[in-house]
Amino acid sequence: GNLRQLETLDIRGTSIVMLPQTIIKLQKLQHLHAGFPTKGNYLCTRHVLHTYGFNQLDACTSLCCCAATPCVMMDKDYGGVVLPGGTKKLKSLHTVRGVHVSCGDVVIQEIGRLTGLRKLGVMGINEKNNVKFCSAISNLSRLESLSVQSDKGCLDDISSPPKNLRSLKLEGRLGVLPVWIKKLQNLVKLKLSFTTSSQV
């Protein structure tokens, strides 16, 4: 919280699953990178447990993370970081990557208030939070790059997609592509991962 001149914070590949409240003091922060980059995808809990020989209880006990962030550790798409309340105050943010939003709607609402965002990468979109997420995305008119890991059909409610969006990555069982994609007149890159879409 004392790094008041910090513009870029990169914690990719670390065991950090939750950022401290003091991050909201970094008013000049422009780029936040988190998560586990593994060949372009995020590392999941199952992979960690298998690789290092932990069972679920061992991992929770030794890493001391389940008590604080059970929704992240127990989620199959573990690998993102949870933002603290007050993130909406970081008005200088242009890039936010590797954020996990399945713990509640507050994080999603705060992201929706970061109207200066150009690049956003989130995971943990599901049936419970997809409406809030779609509403938040509609507020980010300057967004140029969006990466989303979601459950099937959880992105259909974006009524007004960012018109400047140039890059879109969708990861999950889509079923069909969201109809709003055809509104993206500036889109030059579309990447689908782990999808079962019949349109591809």
Image (spheres, grey):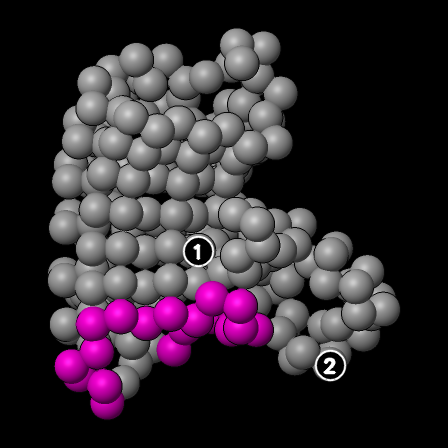
Q: Alpha-carbon distance for marks 1 and 2?
A: 23 Å
Asked if labels 2 and 1 touch by Cβ distance under 8 angstroms, the answer is no
Q: How many marks?
A: 2
The residue that label 1 is drawn on is: 98
Residue at 29%, 40% in the rendered image = 145
**Res 47 quadrant in image:** bottom right
As drawn, the label of residue 62 is: 2
Residue at 25%, 20% in the rendered image = 184
Considering the numbered disc 2 on the image, is that residue within a helix, a strand or a loop? helix
Horizontally, residue 74 falls left or right of residue 1, namely: right
Residue 80 horizontal/vertical position (percent): 50, 58
Considering the numbered disc 1 on the image, is that residue within a helix, a strand or a loop? strand
Indicate whether residue 8 is drawn in magenta: yes
Q: Earlier in the sequence, mark 1 or mark 2?
A: 2
Which mark is in front, 1 or 2? 1
Residue 133 horizontal/vertical position (percent): 36, 39
Report the residue that reaches farthest toward the bottom: 2
Q: Range of the magenta residues?
A: 2-20
Indicate whether residue 18 is drawn in magenta: yes
- Looking at the rendered structure, the kind of residue marked 1 is Gly
Q: Can residue 160 be seen?
A: no
Figure quadrant of the N terminus: bottom left
Residue 139 horizontal/vertical position (percent): 19, 38
Is the residue 129 above or below the residue 56 in the image?
above
Crowd rating for badge 1 (residues with CA inside 10 Å; few <14, some 14–19, many 20+): many
Is the residue 126 above or below the residue 67 in the image?
above
Horizontally, residue 49 falls left or right of residue 18, namely: right
Residue at 85%, 69% in the rendered image = 53
- Looking at the rendered structure, the kind of residue marked 2 is Ser
